[in-house]
Image (cartoon, rainbow, N blue to C red):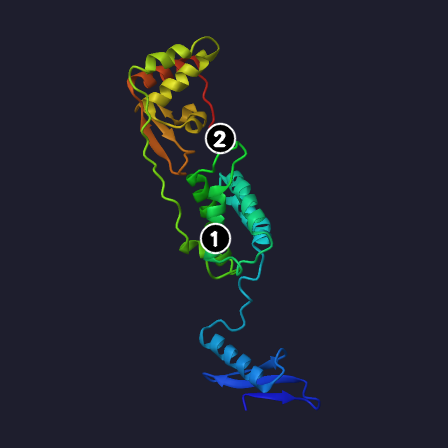
């Protein structure tokens, strides 16, 4: 018999069977009738066949607890943009409250997406599609990390489509606008003129300029070596004659070598 009661009082049902020569036995404390015991035994056998028997109950941990105890520390240790993750993760924690991973379905993620799109920002403007997509991306990352750590086994975000964005840039500085911009960079703004000219001549971001040091300005080859980029990948950017002239002049006034941090 696969299920049976044990002991004089027979208060609990037990199971005993073999699968592929391996013996399995145990107590089914929740069962009150033989039918319930047989149903529980059938479930145990199915888990054995699928290789899931004996695993922890996946998905029972609360999303908010995982974010606080695991995801935020992981982000701080592995990402330069961890402050953005921490800020957006706060919104996710507040929205999903005390729900476990198992309780968060694709339908609930879709509702989160819609509610965030319809919400108003602190500046009293409608939240942008790009902002909502960033929150969805972070939520998906949290689920993927939880899967890696064997906390859950599914990611409902994979079944929710992000908003389609129009990322084409139509605005750029026209040739006739540049003199007006340079004229505005006089007096108290004069110190910004070299930075603006370098930006116009190379197309590099402000953060990339601020992280430049002479060690990464190769005047012999006429290139800038960018290391702390948005993508995390190093790249070289050629200088045009005006940028080369600006940096050569600055180098003359700063002969001492500096050390890149």
**Residue shown at the point (49%, 39%) measured from the top left:** 81
* Badge 1 element: helix
Number of marks: 2
Dot 2 alpha-carbon crowd within 10 angstroms: few under 14, some 14 to 19, many 20 or more? few
Return the x and y of residue 248 as percentages of the image width and height: 36, 16
Specify the quadrant that holds the N terminus: bottom right
Return the x and y of residue 29 as percentages of the image width and height: 63, 79
Instruction: In this rendered view, identify the residue nearer to me: 196 or 236.
Output: 196
**Residue shown at the point (48%, 44%) measured from the top left:** 135
Q: Which residue is mark 1?
A: 109
- Point out which mark residue 261 bears: 2
Vertical relation: 216 (above or below) 113: above
Q: Is residue 217 left or right of residue 54?
A: left
Return the x and y of residue 182 as percentages of the image width and height: 37, 12
* Badge 2 element: loop
Vertical relation: 34 (above or below) 179: below
Along the polypeptide, which appears first: circle 2 or circle 1? 1
Q: Residue furthest right?
A: 9
Return the x and y of residue 204 as percentages of the image width and height: 37, 27
Vertical relation: 193 (above or below) 168: above
The answer to whether residue 189 shows anywhere in this view is yes
The answer to whether residue 219 shows anywhere in this view is no
Which image quadrant for residue 239? top left
Q: Is residue 251 left or right of residue 43?
A: left
Mark in front: 2 vs 1 = 1
Which image quadrant for residue 32? bottom right
Inter-mark Cα distance, 2 to 1? 41 Å
């Amino acid at each position: 018999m696969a299920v049976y009661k044990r002991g004089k009082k027979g208060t609990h049902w037990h199971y005993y069977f073999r699968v592929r020569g391996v013996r399995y036995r145990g107590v089914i404390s929740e069962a009150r009738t033989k039918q319930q015991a047989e149903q529980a035994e059938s479930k145990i056998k199915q888990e054995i066949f699928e290789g899931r028997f004996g695993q922890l109950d996946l998905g029972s941990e609360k999303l908010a607890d995982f974010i606080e105890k695991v995801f935020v520390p992981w982000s701080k240790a592995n990402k330069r943009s961890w402050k953005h993750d921490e800020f957006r993760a706060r919104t996710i924690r507040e929205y999903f409250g005390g729900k476990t991973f198992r309780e968060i379905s694709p339908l609930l993620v879709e509702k989160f997406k819609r509610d965030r799109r319809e919400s108003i920002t602190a500046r009293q403007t409608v939240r942008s599609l790009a902002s909502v997509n960033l929150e969805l991306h972070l939520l998906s990352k949290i689920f993927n990390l939880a899967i890696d750590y064997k906390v859950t086994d599914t990611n409902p975000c994979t079944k929710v489509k992000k908003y389609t964005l129009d990322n084409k840039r139509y605005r750029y500085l026209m040739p006739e606008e540049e003199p007006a911009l340079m004229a505005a960079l006089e007096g108290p703004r004069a110190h910004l003129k070299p930075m603006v000219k370098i930006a116009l001549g190379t197309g590099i971001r402000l953060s990339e300029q601020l992280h430049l040091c002479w060690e990464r300005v190769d005047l012999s080859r006429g290139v800038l070596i960018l290391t702390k980029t948005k993508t995390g990948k190093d790249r070289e950017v050629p200088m045009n004659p005006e940028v080369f002239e600006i940096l050569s002049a600055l180098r003359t006034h700063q002969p001492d070598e500096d050390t890149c941090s």
